Amino acid sequence: MVVIAEFTIDSDEFILGQVLARHPGTHVEMERIVPASGRVMPYIWMHGPDFGAFEESVRSSDYVRQLKALDVVGDRALYRVEWEADIESLLYGMAETDATILEARGDESWFFRIRFDDHSGLTAFHNFCSENDITFTLNRVYTLADEQPDGYAFELTDAQRSALVTAVEGGYFEVPRRTTLTDIGEKLGISEQSASENVRRGANSVLTKVLLPRSADDFK
């Protein structure tokens, strides 16, 4: 049975977090990815005011072999990071236990949501972290059935769900709109930018599941 784990971890507990936390004022999100054993090359989105300073900071790390800028969309940029092969980190633990990263984001502290084929994968990952002195806080463990017992598995984060609910209740999607992203952010205690990202990504996840062709896996 598929198992999903959500946990938080300080950036200094894993190599990627240490490297990306070196430049203040940035927020990083990792693309959904299956880490490949022996070679971890995550794709990351950087949100911040200074792409150049961020790139210089990351490239100066001894842990980074290459940082390649792939695209810029508004105030965020997509990068591919290739790490030195001889380092051990949280991501290698995920690779060794065949975990899929569903969500990863953070700055000084990171949130991860990862999926395993069964409970044995989660156990192996926990053992890897213990053996390598990686400390994290496990917030939630659940199955696909627990997440969405009789419908779509939208894979929304708590922040995305809260933003969407607030947007719908406030009339954000109505014509004309009865609320703004600024209002949504104020109600949730977050910035207008964060409200915008959570609403857009949450809406995209829901609409993709509902409008695009589905397979039987969507109902598991």
Image (spheres, rainbow, N blue to C red):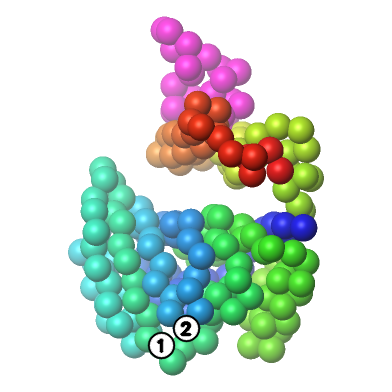
Magenta-highlighted residues:
163-188
Which of the image's four quarters has the N terminus? bottom right
Seen at 48% across and 17% down, the residue is 173
Q: Position of residue 100 (x, y in %)?
A: 57, 62
Q: Position of residue 113 (x, y in %)?
A: 61, 57
Amino acid of disc 2: Gly
- Secondary element type, mark 1: loop
Residue 164, placed above or below residue 78 = above
Q: Looking at this view, is 24 or 163 the one in front? A: 163
Amino acid of disc 1: Ala
Seen at 74% across and 64% down, the residue is 118
Q: Position of residue 175 (x, y in %)?
A: 43, 8
- Secondary element type, mark 2: loop
Residue 76, placed above or below residue 119 = above
Give whichever of discs 1 and 2 has the lower sequence position.
2
Residue 153, placed above or below residue 128 = above
